[in-house]
Image (cartoon, rainbow, N blue to C red):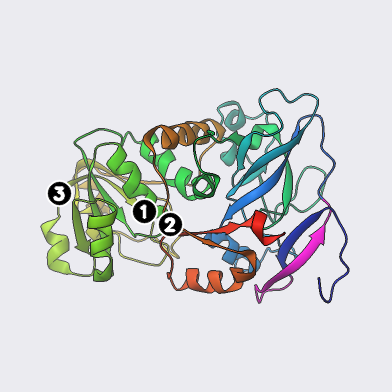
Amino acid sequence: MEGEEAKGNCLAWAARDPSGILSPYQFDRRVVGTNDVALKIKYCGVCYADVVWTRNLHNDSMYPVVPGHEITGVVTEVGSNVTQFKVGDHVGVGTYVNSCRDCEMCNDFLEIHCKKNVYTFNGIDYDGTVTKGGYSSNIVVHDRYCFKIPDEYPLEFAAPLLCAGITVYKPMMHHKMNQPGKSLGVVGLGGLGHMAVKFGKAFGLNVTVFSTSESKRDEAINILGAEKFVVSSDTQQMQEMEGKLDFIVDTAAGNHPFDPYLNTLKVHGIMVLVAFPGEIKFSPRSLNVGARTFAGSITGGTKDTKSMLEYCAAQKIYPKIELIKIDYINEALERMIKRDVKYRFVIDIENSFK
């Protein structure tokens, strides 16, 4: 650990300033409490949120930042009150590690919407400490926010499900997009978009992929199994799609027009935005004519996450990943910004810290 005093029971990589450059770091995880689960991290997915907070894009980063909220590993210790996990279990941790556990949202297992929600990294936990994420050798979490990974499901593929997977699964289930024979449009074919396609196919939907890049046509149709591919910048192709779709999942983070997509919906069609473009602008006519619905969504609560993990295991739904070591993470984040990944980087944590 050059240039820094090495101490603490957890090895990690952290960003120290808004450059976002990560390097080795060491710190102490908390002692396992009565309701806690400790796990040795095996894999951690790489999400665009890792770019946001390592580079202080929201002006609220608390350095050093240890990112990572798509975590899978093996239980090494459980607290005295924990009954749903045991040492050796395969488990995962997602985007949050605490909430009030007493409000309406928590009682409905929608903890992500709790006003006292604590994010897995760069959040303030109930003991006043800053949370540190999965770019690290181990983690301790309250058992409520820990998820059993089915034994037959590979941990490296399970990692992206804890953010990318649940982020599209939740609104698709909430808006009843799991109706065989219906039609689904997916805007964008990145980490979230490719999972929306996979869920759509598993649900028996007729899937159309919208992308600004013609280069993704082969991948969308021949690899992921979409029935149709539309270049969204082609006005004629978009007009030919008007009134054809029952549902749309929009995963595009960059600024883009919304009217052309809304116009591809049938009467009572539903469009859900799961990304964070800089602005949302569309004509009321695109919404009102056709009685369409435009909705937003983020990630899901604990009940939905458990359901998704079980569904992916039963249906053998696996994200497409590129496995890397932690010492490649700075290059990986740059490639993510350039959209040069198919479709999710996953860090091999166990072999990175040997």
User: Is 316 drawn above or below residue 287 in the view shown?
Assistant: above
Say which quarter of the image contains residue 82. Answer: top right
Residue carrying label 2: 191
| Spot occupied by residue 348 in the image (x, y as percentages of width and height) | 60, 57
Classify mark 3: residues with Cα within 10 Å, few (<14), some (14-19) or many (20+): some
**Which residue shows up at 59% across the image and 47% down it?**
95
Instruction: Tell me the number on the disc at residue 243.
Output: 3
User: Is 276 drawn above or below residue 206 in the view shown?
Assistant: below
Q: What's the CA distance linking mark 3 and mark 2?
A: 27 Å
Number of residue marks: 3
Is 29 covered by the magenta stretch? no
- Label 1 residue SS: helix
- Label 2 residue SS: helix
Q: Could you tell me the amino acid type at mark 2?
A: Gly
Is 20 covered by the magenta stretch? yes
Instruction: Tell me the number on the disc at residue 194.
Output: 1
Q: Could you tell me the amino acid type at mark 3?
A: Gly
53 vs 146, nearest the viewer: 146
Q: What's the CA distance linking mark 1 and mark 2?
A: 6 Å
Q: In which quarter of the image is the C terminus?
A: bottom right
Classify mark 2: residues with Cα within 10 Å, few (<14), some (14-19) or many (20+): many
